[in-house]
Amino acid sequence: MVSERWSASAVEGLISLPLESLLTRDYEADPALVHERLRARYGPVAPVDVLGVPVWFVLGYDEVLHIMQNARDVWSKRVDHWRAYAEGRVPADWPLLALLRADNSGFHDGERHRGLRGAWIAGLRPFQEPGSEQAQRLERAMVRYCDDLVGVMAEAGPTGRADLATQYGRPFPLLVANHLLGLTIERGEDMVEDQWRLLDGPDSAGAYQRLNAALLELATAKRQRRGDDLPSYMIEAKPDLTDEELARELMMLSGFLDFTGSLICNVILEAITNPRLRESVSVGAIEEVVNRVALANPALANLTFRYARTDVKLGRFTIAAGDPVMLSIAGAHADPRFAGALARDSVRSTRAHLAWGAGPHRCPSQRLAAQMSAIAVRRLLDRFSALKPALPADQLPWRPSPFVRALRSLPVHYELSRSFAGTPRAESAVEPSPPVGGEDGGDGRPRSGLVAFLRRLRRGQ
Ligand code: HEM
């Protein structure tokens, strides 16, 4: 419900319209139904309220693509272009405000954006270049992380029940993050735990502070002593990046890894519930399955806001300068003008989808995120001879979120493959690549803190 602070000044197009709340229980249960209702009522652009704030929700494929491409520079990602915000009408405690005010590449335009984005592209390049030494080392580490996570699950016995979201799909990208960051084992444990707490609590605010401080410290350390890692490559590509700027960029990783964990869970769900997919997985076509799921159930369902710099016609409405739009990737993929043109039974799904964005803000890490998803799912299916959902699909719990379509849990009944006799190797759950500053846990002995954390996750603590 939109608050009085909006209706009191009902002079603008958006707020004078009847606004449907977007984030309802219906939306959590089945966003596709809500998208279709909005599309039928309003067309490709619908006026909605997001947690009490009026927003244009864009569901048309052409419209979403057009805004992402931003050829005429009509759309800004800077929150100060939001008229209601500039006029003080967005409550200071509105839950999404801190995110939209973030001072990082995802929320800048123009030169500043290009500079920071260039650092990301250069920083990720060694890990995404097929055949490079860093990419090969990362791939080997990813396989080990998968085995370690399966090993912790397997401690409960060769058959049993597990939660593949909490125990596998979501922690896996956090372990990969430590490798990318070139963290020492000790610091890696703390950061995995804090990245988890940041999104799921408890003590999300405390976790944010600690992560921020840790990333700042890391940025300073990497500037003094470079390694084969993302922060060092980013500094090399953009030497004028301050430690504070680098820490703010690296802070974005928590969100990106959350999307990756969500995609992994969505692919696992598809692979264990769709017998045709399970077959194709077993013949090694997993990358195709990842693409198909990114298309059918995009992990990043809706994007953070963009703001119109000028009045602009969109769908059946005129968007006034300063109005916010929220692009819905999930809505765009279901647009009959796009979905209707896809051949349902073709062996390869289209790459013309928007799950990785498009235009100047397009995801610079698509290759890595898709590779992480493919490795995680393939290794899981190798390690288990049977994985059966423990809940019917319509009872699976989804996390309420304006942006991510993510399972809260993915309970399964499992049976381990006979060939897998793995037990977790405490020393490998966080492997530095290579350790910077000579710290490897101090005494060179394997550290078991992270494995203990994973065990606590297993017990649902
Ligand atoms: C399944 C996982 C992922 C998905 C679905 C995804 C998707 C996206 C999308 C749609 C955007 C564009 C946002 C917009 O236009 O507003 C984006 C931007 C971005 N992504 Fe990803 N991403 C994923 C994983 C990652 C990972 C693992 C990293 C880093 C290691 C990453 C780094 C970035 C960065 C830095 C941007 C901002 C680019 C810019 O503003 O120029 N992403 N991502």
Image (cartoon, helix red, strand yellow):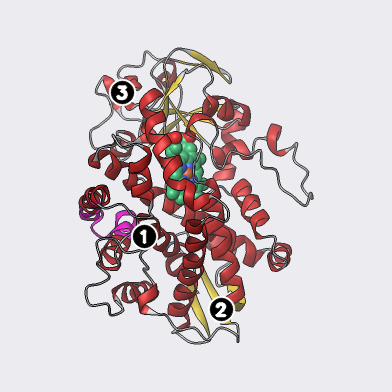
Residue, disc 3: 80
Specify which label sits upstream in the sequence, 1 or 2.
1
* Marks 3 and 2, how far apart at CA: 50 Å
Please name the residue shown 44% across and 41% down the image: 122
Q: Tell me if I can see residue 428 in this picture.
A: yes
Region in magenta: 194-211
| 261 relative to 274 in the view: left or right | left
| Picture coordinates of residue 406, whole percent (x, y) | 48, 54
- 202 vs 306: above or below: below
Identify the residue position indicated by label 2 in the image.
Answer: 414
Q: Quadrant of the C terminus?
A: bottom left
Name the residue beneath numbered marker 1: 178
Which circle's residue, 3 or 1, is located before the other in the chain? 3
Q: Nearer the viewer, residue 401 or 11?
A: 401
Q: Are marks 3 and 1 in contact (CB under 8 Å)?
A: no
Q: Residue at x 33, y 75 (%)?
A: 456
Q: Is residue 89 left or right of residue 424?
A: left
N-terminal-most mark, 3 or 2: 3
- Give the residue type at disc 2: Tyr
Q: Secondary structure at mark 2?
A: strand
Quick one: SS at disc 3? helix
Kind of residue indicated by mark 3: Asp
- Label 1, label 2: how many angstroms apart (C-alpha)? 28 Å
* Local secondary structure at mark 1: helix
Q: Are marks 3 and 2 in contact (CB under 8 Å)?
A: no
Residue 54 lies left or right of residue 92; in this view the side is right
